[in-house]
Amino acid sequence: MGKTNSIDFQVTWRDLDANGHMANTSYMDYATYSRIVYFERYGFGAKAMKELGLGPIALNDNLSYRREMHMLDKFRIELLWGGVNEKQTRFIIVNRFFVDDVLSAEVTSMTCWMDLEKRKIVVPPEGLMKGLLDLPKTENFQEL
């Protein structure tokens, strides 16, 4: 599989809320999972991060809805790079949810990586940083 910023999914029964559409917690779960899948493609999945003693951290998340998603909808998530600070320790990662090429939702997350032993935010290792650099930038990419 080539390195790509797009991951395909399908809405399942457990993703639904009482109104019959995808629950806000499901959007957050898929956003987190798609980041792990993406970085796995660069050799930095959950197992590698555990071996390195690194943990991905979401400092905050913002979810914006555009269109409802329902049971069995096939959707894709595209990951984009929304910003970085000067020290390269904080990153904005944007997850855009599409159904039939129509934007359905967007999760914007301020993220970082933590040295789990020292409990300190760190600059990601070179390969992990490459994954970030390979992400397409958002239209409003920010220097934080």
Image (cartoon, grey):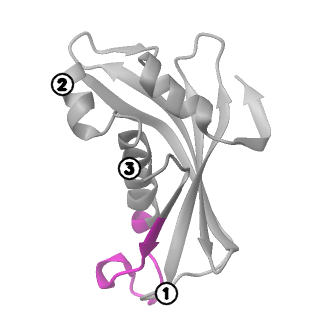
Q: Is residue 1 magenta?
A: no
Left/right of residue 111 with respect to residue 119 in the rendered view:
right
Q: Secondary structure at mark 1?
A: loop
Q: Which residue is painted at 62% across and 71% down in the image?
A: 98
Residue under the image location 38 percent in, 59 percent down: 29
Residue 3: x %, y % from top left: 50, 46
Circle 3: element type? helix
Q: Earlier in the sequence, mark 2 or mark 1?
A: 2
User: In this rendering, is residue 15 above or below 124?
Assistant: below
Q: Residue at x 48, y 84 (%)?
A: 21
Left or right of 92, for residue 59 = left
The residue that label 1 is drawn on is 70
Q: Amino acid at mark 2?
A: Glu
Residue 129 x, y percent position in the rendering = 50, 24
Disc 2 versus disc 1: nearer the observer: 2
Q: Earlier in the sequence, mark 2 or mark 3?
A: 3
Quadrant location, the C terminus: top right
Label 3, label 1: how many angstroms apart (C-alpha)?
Answer: 23 Å
- Residue 14 placement: quadrant: bottom left
The magenta span reads: 8-26
- Residue that label 2 marks: 51
SS for callout 2: helix
Residue reaching furthest right? Answer: 139
Q: Which residue is mark 3?
A: 37
Report the front residue among 139 and 38: 38
The span from disc 2 to disc 3 (Cα, nearest Å) is 17 Å
The relative height of residue 120 versus residue 134 in the rendered view (above or below) is above
Q: Tag 3: residue type?
A: Val
What amino acid type is highlighted by mark number 1? His
Q: Residue at x 27, y 29 (%)?
A: 49
First in sequence: mark 3 or mark 1?
A: 3
Category of crowding for the residue at label 2, using alpha-carbon neighbours closer than 10 angstroms: few (below 14), some (14–19), many (at least 20): few
